[in-house]
Amino acid sequence: MNEVALKRIKELREKITTAVAGNLGATFAESTRARLTLLLAEAGLPHSEGIVFSYLQNHPEQEEAIIAGNKFGSEEIETFLLGLLKQQRSAHRDLIVEQLGMRKKADLVARLQPYLADADRHVRFQTANALFNIGGKDAALALCDFISDPDEWISMTILRLLCIMRELDSIPILIEKYHQDEDLRRKALMISFLARFRSVTLLPIFDEGIQARDARLRANSIEAIGNLSLPPDDIKNRIEQHLHDPNNRIRANAILAIAKLEPEKIKPEIQEMVASNDVQLRRSAAFILGMIPSDEYHDLGAALVADKSEVVRKRMIQSLRNFSSEFVFNQLDLALSDQNKWIRKHAIDMAARLSKFPHKKILGLLKTERAAPNLEACLNFFTFHPIEESMNAIKLHVKDRRLPVVKALLAAVAAIGGVEGVKSVAPRLEQRDPQVIRALSEILIKAGERKILEDLVERFSQLKHENQVEALIPSLSSSLKILEQGDSMPEPLLKSFEKIEVAERPLTPPRPAEPAAEPEENEEPGLPIPEEVSEKPRDEARNVEEPAELDLDLGEEGDSEIPGLLSLGDLGGSGMAEDKPVVKKPIREKPRVSPHYRAGLKYYNVGKYKKALAEFSKLLETEEAPPANVFLYMGLMQCEQENYEQARDYLQTFLGKDPNHSKANFVLGKVYRQLKLWNGLIDIYEKFVGGELEASPKMKTKIYHDLGIACVLVAHYERGAQLLDSLIKLHPEDAEVGYYLALAHFHMNKISSASQILHQASKAPASNKRISKLIEALAVKVRSGGI
């Protein structure tokens, strides 16, 4: 990086620092001032340390203050943070430990070790991670002393971190702790983590585990031995006897270990797994095919890609990366048409990694997919495969407000159309979201649009309203992180900083938000100050030039709305904005509101549904285009009155106009349940589960309940079991959930688990006699072993 670039970056940092320091004295909310302090620390100028430390001392309860203080390496701040950590009543002690660990100072190991025994489990967890970040022998030995923490979350975290650190001095202590532990489940987990050492020193422990009675210990020990650098005969002698073990996991791990040594010899075993009726065994076969040489297993791979079980198909798609390109192309072509959206997503992700994958089918999916993960995957595909033909389909989603989709869309547009492409879609984005502003500015800055960054800094130095300042903080924070990369920053941006311009205009210093004096004829004008709505006369405000590249659109109240970079794509233009004439907006007449609508709404709000229904019915008779929400209110009230047929008609009419209305979809699902229209219920509630529609926690419980039961009733047993299993863990007392979960397991030939679930359900208080009778009838069938 040359001196010109260093100078420009320094000027940007100084300007941000000056602007932030000025805003810290404003009467903003404390949360905003805390974020400004963090931005000040991210700018990284040494003279900011005093301001940041002072704020940290006065507001230690603010998370941003702790993070900001830790960005400076002074001993004074470190001592202050350690002092806060000692005080049991201090806020965010876990965050303090985490931040101290980021300093990676070896002398902090001894000072942080006592907090591995802290009463707060979150402090213990972050202390373990902090010592891991510091690293070294002393940190590893300190972690070893607390591997027997009574909280399994902490003990397994420490064990995992030790195995990643791979400090050989910790092995004897880990062996000792393993022998002292009496919990078989934890010992099995310890075996799994110890296997990461790949150390022959641990072979006696693995040999002991392989002879244990506990299936988990044996399975994990077989996996560990298979990963050791032992002579092939030694591995086979230990593992071959387990190839036909009745436990699926033991059998799968043994087959995988032998398959790594002799892929041809083990093919009959894998064929048997693929032909099995056991879903988990077939899934294990799919996993194994992704771990061994695959040239001879194309037939088995193709069979698993077309498996009837979704979990098997999903696992096999993930294993395809181990197969040849031609085979993968053919199988992904099938998977892209799968009914399960997650399988389609994994197939798209896999296709994105293949440089010559045909794009036609994914272009079709880009037009039809609605779930955010799938849409994001399609957009990511065209980021890696920039094809001009896809631009129109990409622009169909420019109004999508889901942030992951917006980021993926901008990346795809930038890959295909470059900076001009991004600028063309920028005005159509939802730019009142600060995170959208951040994503948009990030893309443009990385593409080398240095002027965008300079104008963002200029705007920030001029803004005075709190909402405006908050809106630009994420963008500036992201920009500073890009600048921190130094020589590693994106090449277009680095070249832009290093380029020496013939007539370079220096950045203007920060100015107070007041009318600017008229420039002299021989003076080059600086960037214009945006007009701010205030109590000043309109004529005085009109003298201030309005920028063409940034529209703050403050509204009539000035600070009532978050500003949007509504013309961010035009930022960086060298021309000055022309004076715009003030055009008075015509006064609009208020729309006429029907008295029936007013009366119906009044009765609806006080719960007088019969009168509300009568008024709304008159409205529908007299108005050609009634308000859409009338159909929603009618549907909700008809549902309350148990008139489910009418409720369905009204709700379907409303959803035809607003298909993403959360409450309307939820209530329509309830109506479908009463009408026993199970497929309709499944279609709606899967949208909630897939994230296409938002639901409150209370709604989610009901959705999982009804969706799980509906899936069982239409013979989608695996999906129903998956949903009900997650629900029964939260509500084990629900006898109805227990019955339908047992019914699903029974139809999947899992007689043993069905019996256990029924036994538990029979103990729970049944909501009605019908469920009790159903449980008894199913119990008889389970005991007889067949239907």
Image (cartoon, rainbow, N blue to C red):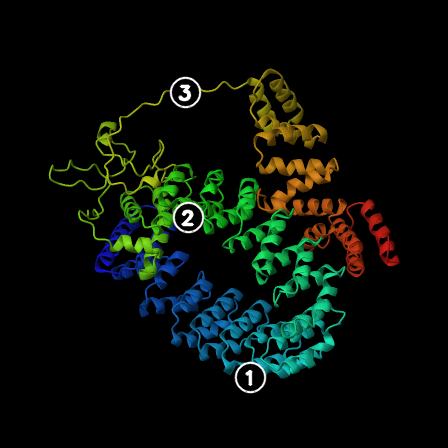
Q: Secondary structure at mark 1?
A: helix
Q: Nearer the viewer, mark 2 or mark 1?
A: 2
Disc 3 packing (10 Å; few <14; some 14–19; many ≥20): few
The tag earlier along the polypeptide, 3 or 1, is 1
Using the numbered discs, state the Cα–Cα distance from disc 3 to disc 1 in whole angstroms: 82 Å
**Where is residue 599 drawn, in percent x and y?**
58, 21
Q: Secondary structure at mark 2?
A: helix
Question: Looking at the rendering, which quadrant does residue 57 occupy?
Answer: bottom left
Residue of label 2: 415
The relative height of residue 645 versus residue 763 in the rendered view (above or below) is: above
Other residues around mark 1 within 10 Å, as few (<14) / some (14–19) / many (≥20): few
Label ID, residue 588: 3
Task: Tell me how far mark 2 sits from mark 3, CA to CA.
Answer: 44 Å
Query: In this view of the protein, can residue 62 be seen by the observer?
Result: no
Q: Residues within 10 Å of mark 2 (few under 14, many from 20)?
A: many
How far apart marks 2 and 1 lie (CA) works out to 53 Å
Choose mark 2 or mark 3, whichever is in front. 2
Q: Tell me the residue that label 1 is attached to.
A: 172
Q: Which mark is residue 300?
A: none
Q: Secondary structure at mark 3?
A: loop
Whether residue 333 sits left or right of residue 551 in the image: it is: right
Earlier-in-chain disc, 2 versus 3: 2
- With 280 as the anchor, is 472 left or right in this view? left
Q: Hey, which residue is sitting farthest top in the picture? A: 622
Q: Is residue 748 above or below residue 26?
A: below
Mark 2 is on which residue type? Ala
Three-letter residue code for mark 3: Arg
Q: Are marks 2 and 3 in contact (CB under 8 Å)?
A: no
